[in-house]
Amino acid sequence: MKRKTLTPAVVPFSDAPEGPKGALSSYFCFCRDWRQRNSHRVISTIDAGQIQGQEWRSMSDERKSKFEKLAAKDRERFTAELELYKKVHGCSPPKKKVKKQVKPVKDPDKPRGAMSSYMYFCKDYRSKNKNNALSVIEAGAQQGAEWRSLPAAKRAKYDKLALQDRERHSAEMAKYKMSHPEPVPVEQETLKQAGPKKPTSSYMFFNREVQVPPFPASKPLPSL
């Protein structure tokens, strides 16, 4: 008796699994190489991005060809994995849904948070430099540099203000908690038992009928 072979059905768009990893551009290959060569440096993400952009723009075509070859290989890898995905699942990969972050509703009665000594220093700095035509990033960098070099005698003024604000916040929070008691948390296991079973998707029903071979993991790019 011949064994019946099942051909993969067309999977609904919303139930299809995640597709292959996208191909890297030549600039992304360069950035990966740059991070490996400068892993010992302590540098912020913003500063690193600016240095990478400047170095890439001033790079010769001969040096760029190395990363363009890596990007071409990765495009070939992506094309092959995409064709395999379509052959196995019968459809194109679904687009990633961007989840919108819902901001929690702010309680108007809740006391304002306490300010740190650095925040008081920045507030004083802005009042003294209102006419300074600096961008937000440049002003923030200047404030940080001035704060780090500020002697302890001058910092004491802002430390005192921060201490007073912490005391104010603690007293106001004590009154707030008395008038706004926290709700009793419900046990997570109780919620699981009480809730109904989640509905099975059409893709899960399809998997019960035919064993689809697992999609191979993306191969890493060749080391630079």
Image (tube, rainbow, N blue to C red):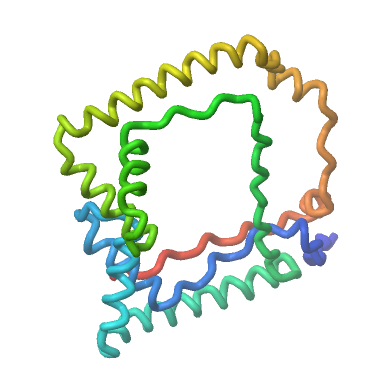
Left or right, 23 with respect to 215, comes to left
Residue at 34% in and 57% down: 45
Residue 38 percent coordinates (x, y) = 22, 61
Picture layout, residue 78 above or below residue 197:
below
* Residue at the top extreme of this rendering: 178
Using the rendered image of the protein, determine whether residue 5 is visible from the camera's viewpoint.
Answer: no
Residue at 78% in and 65% down: 8
Q: Nearer the viewer, residue 216 or 199?
A: 199
Locate the N terminus and report the quarter of the image it occupies.
bottom right
Residue 181 percent coordinates (x, y) = 67, 13
Picture layout, residue 198 above or below residue 13:
above
Q: Nearer the viewer, residue 204 or 177?
A: 177
Residue at 14% in and 36% down: 151
Q: Nearer the viewer, residue 156 or 203?
A: 156
Q: Nearer the viewer, residue 89 or 103?
A: 103
Using the rendered image of the protein, determine whether residue 77 is visible from the camera's viewpoint.
Answer: yes
